[in-house]
Image (cartoon, rainbow, N blue to C red):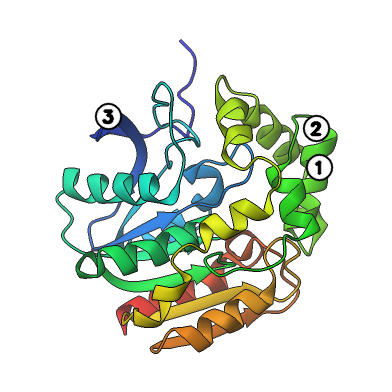
Amino acid sequence: MSEKRPEIANSIQTGDFKTNYHDLGDGYPVVLLHGSGPGVTAWANWNKVFPLLKDDFRVIAPDMVGFGFTERPENPVFNMNVWVQQTIDLFDALKIEKANLVGNSFGGALALSMAIKYPERVNKLVLMGSMGVTFPLTYGLDRVWGYTPSEANMEELLELFTYDHSFATKDLIKTRYESSMQPGFQESFSAMFPAPRQNGVEGMAGNQNYIRGIQQETLIVHGREDRVIPLQNSYELLQLIDNAQLHVFGKCGHWTQIEHTEEFAELISTFFKR
């Protein structure tokens, strides 16, 4: 019998499909929303911070529909309304009235949309390398969303994601490449952000006019050397959100939670406990 993949955890009905999600710890709920890279899963995005948060919080990390091991419905539609509805359905299924949200990149735009549409369900926000405001498509994001499966292309992406390229190990490249080749993964991924990919940026920024209304305490986190989502995004979000603070990590690319795992976990834990 083959060993169970660590990416596959719990499964629960959310609307018309079942969501794969991780659920660790017993404290106040913290929901981690992953980014939109090829082969991404909640596990790949967040597993390094799971052990650092689970003793203080109930940590919940779903695969958003179209990504990872969440069920892929027939004739799917991928847009922010669908992902917001999935998140609310997950809250309801798990009987979570209110939670802290941590959104990475695409997940940041989703966290913002949640705070706008369901403010009563969101306690505090963490936005890490976040989308959600408009910006000219970067070379890095164009390469991420335009990914075609090969180990060479995955190696380029992991180097784009990191400041310290030693994090882009041969094992990680191989694992992420093989993940991107799982049945159905590339088909749904390539359908999500077709050219012209600037449209995908604008789709993630659809709620930009409403961000000023967000009242939740918000911690904005960005890597200074991020080549996928510009640091300027986080300065804009800082200006738009009343109760916001910004922490910039030097010598850090798009993956703060991987390049500065312990500092990132300590930062958000302190923010949530305060």
Measuring from the top left, give residue 221's x and y in whole percent: 55, 75
Crowdedness near tag 1: few (<14), some (14–19) or many (≥20) residues, C-alpha within 10 Å: many
Indicate the secondary structure of the residue bearing disc 1: helix
**Hey, what amino acid is under mark 3?**
Asp
Q: Is residue 63 left or right of residue 59?
A: right
Q: Tell me how far mark 2 sits from mark 1, CA to CA.
A: 6 Å
Farthest residue to the top: give it: 1
Q: Tell me how far mark 2 sits from mark 3, CA to CA.
A: 34 Å
Q: Is residue 106 at all visible to an observer of this figure?
A: yes
Above or below, comparing residue 7 to residue 37 in the picture:
above
Task: List the residue tagged with mark 1.
Answer: 155
Indicate the secondary structure of the residue bearing disc 3: loop
Above or below, comparing residue 215 to residue 41 in the picture:
below
Crowdedness near tag 2: few (<14), some (14–19) or many (≥20) residues, C-alpha within 10 Å: some
Picture disc at residue 151: 2
Quadrant the N terminus occupies: top left
Crowdedness near tag 3: few (<14), some (14–19) or many (≥20) residues, C-alpha within 10 Å: few
Q: Is residue 61 at all visible to an observer of this figure?
A: no
Q: Nearer the viewer, residue 60 or 181?
A: 181
**Hey, what amino acid is under mark 2?**
Glu
Q: Nearer the viewer, mark 3 or mark 1?
A: 3
Q: Nearer the viewer, residue 99 or 273?
A: 99
Say whether marks 2 and 1 touch (CB < 8 Å). Answer: yes
Residue at 80% x, 53% y is: 159
Measuring from the top left, give residue 140's x and y in whole percent: 77, 56
Say whether marks 3 and 1 touch (CB < 8 Å). Answer: no
Measuring from the top left, give residue 123's x and y in whole percent: 27, 72
